[in-house]
Amino acid sequence: MITSTINYEGELHTTAIHLRSGEAIVTDAPVDNMGKGAAFSPTDLLATSLACCALTTMGIVANKNGINVDGASAEITKHMASDPRRVSKIDLLIKMPSDKTYTPEQKTLMEYTAIHCPVAKSLHSDLLQNVLFQWG
């Protein structure tokens, strides 16, 4: 089954449509690569996908283990390299809610889950993933 369709709109813009939900994502080239930076760039989405996947899989594992991670958030910093132009490093800071207390075992489980999420395991091993946690 097709997941999405993507249309090139011109002027370095694309629109991706998720077929099951009808939701759209618009992209633009970044300002350092001939774009306006008016939307997520494709490489922004790559880095952002890592954070979304980490938080989602943490939520799945947390639900199965009676752990409340509601309110967790993430910050992404994407680092680009040239020759070839690519994402070379992603810094991911996961901020856990300050109004909750976690045992050492729960912290270990959440950290393991984030670091081993499907997107993390799908990225090339040359791409450095620096994942840090801020526990309340």
Image: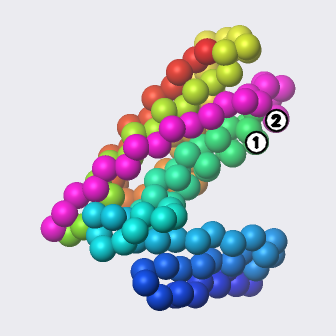
Residue at 55% x, 32% y: name it: 94
What label does residue 64 carry, if any?
A: 2
What label does residue 35 carry, if any?
A: none
- Magenta residues span 63-83
Q: Amino acid at mark 2?
A: Lys
Q: Which of these two is toward me, 113 or 16?
A: 16
Residue at 31% x, 50% y: name it: 79
Answer few, some or many: residues within 10 Å of disc 2's Cα (few below 14, many 20 plus, some between 14 and 19): few
Q: Quadrant of residue 34?
A: bottom left
In the rendered view, does 54 fall on the left or right side of 125? right
Image position of 115 with respect to 80: above or below = above
Residue at 76% x, 79% y: name it: 19
Q: Percent x, y for residue 68?
A: 79, 25
Q: Which of these two is toward me, 66 or 13?
A: 13
User: Do the numbered discs 1 and 2 sit on residues whose CB atoms are within 8 Å?
Assistant: yes
Q: Quadrant of residue 16?
A: bottom right
Q: Percent x, y for residue 88?
A: 29, 54
- Please identify the residue farthest to the left as the structure is shown: 83
For disc 1, the marked residue is 60
In the rendered view, does 41 fall on the left or right side of 64? left
Asked whether 80 falls inside the magenta stretch, the response is yes
Residue at 40% x, 43% y: name it: 77
Tell me the CA gap for discs 1 and 2: 6 Å
Position of the N terminus by quadrant: bottom right
Q: Percent x, y for residue 20?
A: 80, 75
Q: Percent x, y for residue 103?
A: 67, 12
Q: Does residue 1 show up?
A: yes
Asked whether 46 falls inside the magenta stretch, the response is no
Q: Which of these two is toward me, 30 or 42?
A: 30
